[in-house]
Amino acid sequence: MQHTNLQDDAAGGPVWGAESEDLNATKLVWPAGKQIAEHIADRDVVYVVLGGTLTLTVGDLAHELSAGDVLIVEKGTRRALVVGSEGVEYVTAHRRRGGLQIRPLTR
């Protein structure tokens, strides 16, 4: 297993990452009010909140999460995130992605 300490940045983002043959895990820290735009992931992702609060909207359902909460979001589901007033610290884990792959454009 490999792990990486990532640079801490006032703007927030990943601060730590680890990977095994099958899994990726990333610790993220975001400041109050940060928004992650709606997106769709290509694999299931588990969110584990370590501190602070966030609203994770999955499809049309908003989940208010705080320290100790865990939520699994299934692949192919729309998701967006808004950080609460004290910021948030959480870990995500998902099946490991391969390296960058260039695919032909399909029309």
Image: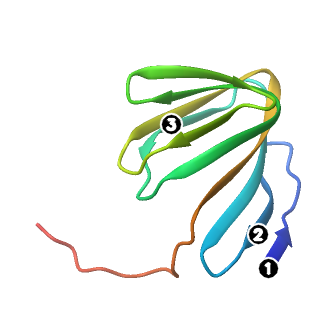
Query: Is residue 40 positioned above or below 69 on the image?
Result: below
Residue type, label 1? Gln
The residue that mark 2 highlights is 18
Q: Position of residue 71 (x, y in %)?
A: 60, 37
Q: Is residue 95 left or right of residue 88?
A: left
**Nearer mark to the viewer, of 3 and 2:** 2
Which circle, 3 or 1, is nearer the viewer? Answer: 1
Verify CB contact (< 8 Å) between mark 1 and mark 2.
Answer: yes
Q: Secondary structure at mark 1?
A: strand
Question: In front: 25, or 81?
Answer: 25
- Give percent across and percent down for residue 48: 72, 42
* Residue beneath the point at 41% across and 51% down: 75
Q: Which residue is mark 3?
A: 37
Amino acid at pointer 2: Ala
Q: Which residue is mark 1?
A: 2
Label 3 neighbour load within 10 Å: few <14, some 14-19, many 20+: few
Report the side of 92 relative to 31 (left or right): left
Give whichever of 13, 53 is nearer the camera. Answer: 53
Pinpoint residue 62: horizontal percent, then vertical percent: 51, 20
Which quadrant is home to the C terminus?
bottom left
Does residue 75 appear left or right of residue 67 in this picture? left
CA–CA distance in space, label 1 to label 2 = 5 Å
Residue 43 location, quadrant: bottom left
